[in-house]
Amino acid sequence: MSMASPVGSTSPCPRCSSTLVEIHLDQAGRALVMRSCSTCDSRWWQRDGEDVAIGSILDTVGSAKKVVAARC
């Protein structure tokens, strides 16, 4: 997985209307985006433009780390 790049968002939070922070990641050629609201402490994840649960992100990242560790 490559390094994260934070990008200031102009999108308002759908819960409280504050400005969101976006963090973009590239995971084996797939685009991951985490959107976070500091005001209401909400977070959302997307993979390739589709909403996903954090559990599926963690499972995928955990599997990638195991493959890298096995190659070392």
Image (spheres, helix red, strand yellow):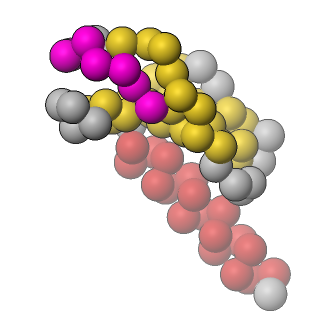
Q: Is residue 1 left or right of residue 32?
A: right
Question: Compared with residue 3, is residue 38 higher up or lower down, i.e. above or below?
Answer: above
Q: Residue at x 26, y 12 (%)?
A: 17
Q: Residue at x 71, y 43 (%)?
A: 26
The percent coordinates of residue 8 (x first, y second) are 53, 28
Q: Residue at x 54, y 64 (%)?
A: 62
Q: Residue at x 45, y 31 (%)?
A: 21
The percent coordinates of residue 23 (x first, y second) are 55, 38
Question: Compared with residue 25, is residue 33 higher up or lower down, i.e. above or below?
Answer: above
Q: Can residue 57 be seen in the rendering of this structure?
A: yes
Q: Residue furthest bottom?
A: 72
Quadrant housing residue 54: top left
Q: Can residue 52 be seen in the rendering of this structure?
A: no
Residue 29 is covered by the magenta coloring = no
The percent coordinates of residue 57 (x first, y second) are 49, 47
Quadrant housing residue 35: top left
How many numbered circles does the render carry?
0
Of residue 8 and residue 22, the one placed in the foreground of this image is 8
Question: Compared with residue 23, is residue 28 higher up or lower down, i.e. above or below?
Answer: below
* Quadrant of the rendering where the C terminus is positioned: bottom right
Q: Is residue 39 left or right of residue 68?
A: left
The percent coordinates of residue 2 (x first, y second) are 74, 54
Tell me which segment is drawn in magenta.
Answer: 15-21
* Quadrant of the rendering where the N terminus is positioned: bottom right
Q: Is residue 47 left or right of residue 58?
A: right
